[in-house]
Image (cartoon, rainbow, N blue to C red):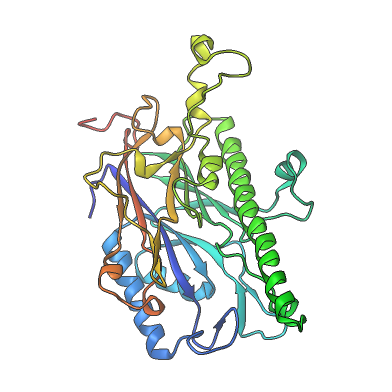
Amino acid sequence: MHAMSEVRMASFNLCNFALPRVHWHRRGAGRTYTDAQWMQKRQWIAETLAAIDADIVAFQEVVSVDALRALAAEAGYAHFACATEPRFSRDDPDIYVNSTVAIASRFPITASAEIKTFETIIDQTLLDRAATYSRRPLRCAIDVPGLGETIVYAAHFKSQGALVRDATIDAIADWDEKLDRFYVERMYAGIDQVSKRAAEAGAIYLQVREDLQADIDRPVIVLADLNDGPGSHTLAILTQAQPIEDGIGSVDLADVPPAHRFRRYIHRLYDAYALPAHADFERPVTFHADRRSSVLDYAIVSNGLHPQNPNGRGAVVGHSVFDAHFAAGAPAATTSDHAPVVVTIRARRTEAGSPVIGL
């Protein structure tokens, strides 16, 4: 168990958490679990939850919601929220076409809601009027000891991969034309998936700004599979943490009135990996499948959890990736192709409001 003054939060992509005989995206070999595989997967998830010892867990790739709620309760999470149902094929109710997200907590969830709209993003950008989240994020207000009301988001951005509709290509008889068309269609699909993640990042950023309007030091954390890397535009749009090089309007940064300079920090979000000291020379990957490895999973925090913010209610002091199943070569079907990301936050105040001893 961790110290009483510390809170641990995790992002955990479960990889097709769907009951046996529910198929993943289409029917085919290896696209559903046998009863034995399902038992193995549940056991691995339970063991992993015990190992990460997180107080709050945001889950992605949730299909069988009631099964996850029961598993979380068995693991000691008395509070559970999932606002959006997964989607199944109209033609085959045993095939799921889109998963959802959920949050399990050891502390009371006082409010929860799905985040629905892109209205502001659509009005101010080139996005189509029909644009929306590929999977609607979940926003929970959680009463966290030492931090007070903390806003936690679970999110899962648009998947990578430029998917071309089979029917579009199959309808072309001539092979030269078929191949030529395939690459053009894949290019269009690539633009769509990159722009969708960028829009999702911007929409979440605006939601977090609303959370901070009344209380700039409010603890807010986004636990997410962003489906993009640390150097991506997706992360840069979500955090707004890149340096300001050209000033604020026509005013050099050094000439911003001192009384207002602090606002440069409250309008940023922070990749929690970069906040504590690390012994690692290389950032651990969080995704490994098909001989591909990358960082896709994150804990993103508001300035209220930045270690250098003297008014923050907590400080990020640790960031861990639980990737032992990658090294062991365990099959993703009975484990996951993602590794849980866990961030440790040290509260700066006790429930009574006094400073935590030693801080």
Please indicate whether residue 5 sits to the left or right of residue 199 in the image: left
Residue 85 locus on image (x, y percent): 62, 69
Residue 175 spot, x, y in % from top left: 70, 81
In the image, residue 118 above or below residue 165? above
User: Which quadrant of the figure contains the N terminus?
Assistant: bottom left
Residue 212 falls left or right of residue 282? right
Viewer-proximal residue among 149 and 56:
56
> Quick check: can you spot residue 145?
no
* Total labels drawn: 0
Q: Which quadrant: the C terminus?
A: top left
Looking at the image, residue 198 sits to the left or right of residue 342; the answer is: right
Q: Position of residue 71 (x, y in %)?
A: 41, 73
The residue sitting at the front extreme is 176
Q: In the rendered view, would you say 123 is above or below 328?
A: above
Q: Residue at x 54, y 42 (%)?
A: 238
Which residue: 66% across, 67% down?
A: 183
User: In the depicted view, which residue is nearer to us: 292 or 258?
Assistant: 292
Q: Nearer the viewer, residue 46 or 40?
A: 40
Residue at 51% from the left image edge and 16% from the top image edge: 253
Q: Is residue 53 left or right of residue 224?
A: left
Residue 23, image x and y in percent?
56, 84
The structure residue drawn at horizontal position 69% and vertical position 78%, both measured from the top left corner, is 166
**Residue furthest right as drawn:** 129
- Any part of residue 252 in sight: yes
